[in-house]
Image (cartoon, helix red, strand yellow):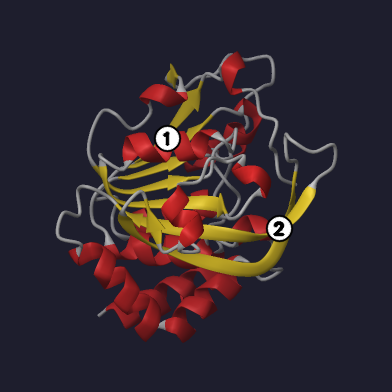
């Protein structure tokens, strides 16, 4: 029963909050993980869920187009109507206010929490509400899984809000993806790819897969070695950490803070 699963998951997170030991690699050490670049991440298999929250932000739309063919569900953080569409959001996404993505069904959680985005076209930051968009991928051919997510979001609104309050009690903008990420992770059973590690998402996904007995693989890919080191203690047989070699062409001019 999904209601029981959600309730138990929230309770366990509230009790222990994943108090695991963390290994922090020395700053003078080379990355100990497999190195690659963003263009190749996720191409080795099909996924049940892909979560895009990596830097530079502008890469997310490009990688979404590539990876929608490889997954059942794709979740994209920091979407929205950016000035002059410098994120290159699809036209139908903008026209439908987040309900379509390149002719695919989509839904968008529009948080009232805002972040300051450094727009490359402006000499100053732009403060905008943080949106998170879920898109149906090619591997969910008949849309069964996507529709199941919509149903759960409607039926278990209070339980999902409880989980959100547990993981993001201070209502931080960087944790606004928790609702959609929790539901999509719980409703899938195959491998998960997280592009861009985070204080909220990495521990949440690790906890869900761990509680399932590690029966599937979670891959966390990150280009910031220091940030990846913060999650080194979560590496396990079921959780792979991948250090992504950043390219000069991907220099980030759109960091949100």
* Above or below, comparing residue 6 to residue 93 in the picture: below
* Above or below, comparing residue 38 to residue 154 in the picture: above
Residue 171 placement: quadrant: bottom right
**Where is residue 89 drawn, in percent x and y?**
50, 46
> Would you say residue 128 is visible in this rendering?
yes
User: Along the horizontal axis of the image, is 6 left or right of 18?
Assistant: left
Q: Name the residue under label 2.
A: 128
Q: Which mark is residue 26?
A: none
Q: Residue pushed farthest left?
A: 142
Q: Nearer the viewer, residue 28 or 86?
A: 86
User: Along the horizontal axis of the image, is 4 left or right of 123?
Assistant: left
**What's the residue at 69%, 37% (across, down)?**
254
Q: Nearer the viewer, residue 18 or 206?
A: 206
**What's the residue at 54%, 36% (across, down)?**
232
Q: Residue 63 carries which label?
A: 1
User: Along the horizontal axis of the image, is 26 left or right of 197?
Assistant: right
Task: Evaluate if marks 1 and 2 touch, with contact meaning CB atoms under 8 Å apart.
Answer: no
Which secondary structure lies at badge 1?
helix
Q: Which of 150 and 165 is in front in this view?
A: 150
Which quarter shows the N terminus? bottom left
Q: Residue pushed farthest right?
A: 123
Count neighbours of disc 2 (C-alpha within 10 A) and say few if under 14, some if 14 to 19, many if 20 or more. Answer: some
**Where is residue 154 drawn, in percent x and y?**
38, 82
Q: Earlier in the sequence, mark 1 or mark 2?
A: 1
**Where is residue 50 drawn, in percent x and y?**
37, 46
């Amino acid at each position: 029963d999904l209601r029981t699963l959600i309730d138990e998951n929230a309770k366990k997170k509230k009790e222990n909050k994943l108090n695991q030991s963390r290994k922090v690699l020395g700053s003078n050490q080379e990355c100990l993980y497999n190195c690659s670049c963003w263009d190749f991440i996720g191409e080795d298999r099909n996924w049940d869920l892909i979560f895009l929250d990596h830097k530079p932000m502008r890469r997310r739309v490009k990688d979404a187009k590539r990876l929608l063919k490889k997954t059942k569900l794709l979740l994209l953080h920091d979407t929205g109507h950016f000035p002059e569409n410098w994120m290159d959001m699809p036209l139908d996404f903008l026209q439908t206010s987040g309900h379509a993505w390149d002719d695919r069904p989509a839904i968008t959680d529009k948080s009232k929490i805002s972040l300051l985005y450094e727009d490359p076209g402006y000499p100053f930051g732009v403060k905008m509400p943080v949106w998170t968009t879920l898109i149906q991928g090619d591997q969910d051919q008949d849309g069964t899984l996507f529709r199941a997510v919509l149903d759960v979001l409607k039926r278990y609104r209070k339980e999902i809000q409880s989980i959100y309050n547990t993981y993001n009690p201070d209502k931080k903008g960087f944790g606004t993806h928790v609702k959609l990420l929790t539901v999509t992770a719980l409703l899938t059973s195959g491998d998960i790819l997280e592009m861009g590690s985070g204080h909220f998402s990495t521990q949440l996904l690790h906890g869900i897969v761990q509680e399932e007995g590690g029966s599937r693989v979670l891959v966390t890919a990150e280009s910031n070695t220091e940030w990846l080191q913060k999650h080194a203690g979560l590496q396990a047989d079921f959780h792979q950490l991948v250090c992504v070699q950043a390219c000069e062409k991907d220099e980030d001019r759109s960091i949100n803070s």
